[in-house]
Amino acid sequence: MAVPLIQQVRVGSYLMKQRLRGTKRYPLVLMLEPLFRCNLACAGCGKIDYPDSILNKRLSVDECVGAAEECGAPIVSIAGGEPLLHRQIVQIVEGLTARKKFVYLCTNALLLHKRLDDFTPSPYLSFSIHLDGDREHHDEAVCQEGVFDRAVAAIREARGRGFRVTCNTTLFEGVDVERVANFVSFATDDLGVEGVTIAPGFAYERAPTQQVFLNRKRTKQLFRDLFALGKGRKWRWNQSQLYLDFLAGNQTYDCTPWGNPTRNVFGWQRPCYLLNEGSVATFKELMETTDWDGYGTGRYEKCANCMMHCGYEATAVADTVGRPLKALGVALRGVRTDGPMAPEVSFETQRPAQWVFDDFVRNQMSRADAARADREAARGCAGASAPGAAPPSSRTDDTAVA
């Protein structure tokens, strides 16, 4: 079983409550980014292209736990950056699991062996290890040799100590589908991970390498080929059957950006985990003031080729709850890998991309500079009023490092 029964029951109960209440929009997974600093610089990553003043920022334990309570999602995915660089990551995890949140701590595993003693195995904690393929492919994707072997060793160590472990795999243009199939078999059969989370890479505008991203047509055929090779193999996925069916071009879905709301050092990011086009102070403000109809495939140019799980898994889950017999049919017969594909969404009314990232970062830096100046002024006043006091330090919380 890819997902433990206790998680299936609790998440299923949450979904049924939302359905019975008639809630139109609700979160399923909180995407929590307590920092953007990372110890790798992957070719397809668009999450870490910030100046040091932002990379050095951290969410506190109270901010992380408060975000989970504020949005109420049953699952919390701790991403980044590299979460294990955060000095208080253990306390963050403990605060979340104590509230019975199912935590997926996403990590490249370079620090996992060193930090493993700090964590306690729990049905509410899973390490989601970034592995994009076999040794050659993964090390190339993360732009550093030896990372695959260290991640594999960390997986074996974590599983040996009783931790839940999954793999998080992103596919890019040029990937060899047979090698992907062999990797999935290796992850589930040899490494014994609980399940694999797989998706096509999102075309981040700030990613250092732009030619690696798949378009929708290529994505659908790639996953059809992959699932065809998987027939007869006992692969375990950490995803819904209908989302996998969507990847293979058998479902026409709109994304559900509010299903995976993002809380990071800027606040609540809008509109989704993948696009940073502003932030607000509260989850309520995010849900009530975001122009949700202005985003998504067929609506916004930046979303054109997106088929990521953080946008579409919530759609597939809602479809599963609403039409369980449909989902059961896919589960029993498997993902269809031939025949006509489902109709594609229309792109006729898609609005052009707005390039707002640079302005957003400048605004955030200006706010940080102003806050720093206020703190220094306050310290200066306090120091001046104390006889013999030393000059105030120039170090601030914004420059704290892991």
Image (tube, grey):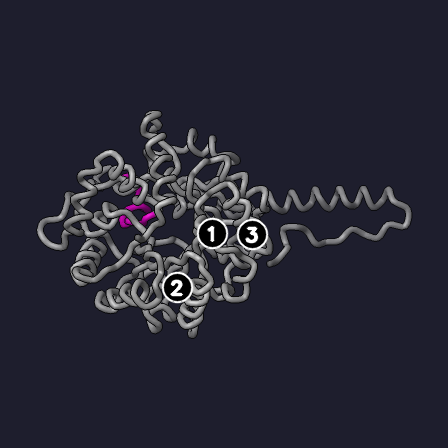
Q: Of label 1 and label 3, which has the lower sequence position?
A: 3
Q: Which mark is residue 122?
A: 1
- In the picture, residue 345 is in which quadrant? top left
The residues tagged by marks 2 and 1 sit, at their Cα atoms, a distance apart of: 33 Å
Is residue 234 highlighted in magenta? no
- Image point 23% across, 41% down: which residue? 253
**Residue count near mark 2 (Cα–Cα under 10 Å), binned few <14, some 14–19, many ≥20:** some
Query: Is the C-beta separation of discs 1 and 3 under 8 Å?
Result: no
23 lies left or right of 222: right
Q: What residue lies at 47% left-to-right and 52% top-to-bottom?
A: 122
Q: Which mark is residue 43?
A: 2
What secondary structure prevails in the magenta region?
Answer: loop
Task: Tell me where residue 353 appears, x and y as whole percent.
Answer: 34, 44
Q: Earlier in the sequence, mark 2 or mark 3?
A: 2
Find the magenta span and give its range: 299-309
Label 2 residue SS: loop
Place of residue 211 in the rendered image (x, y in percent of width and height, measured from the top left):
31, 62
The residue singled out by tag 3 in the image is 54
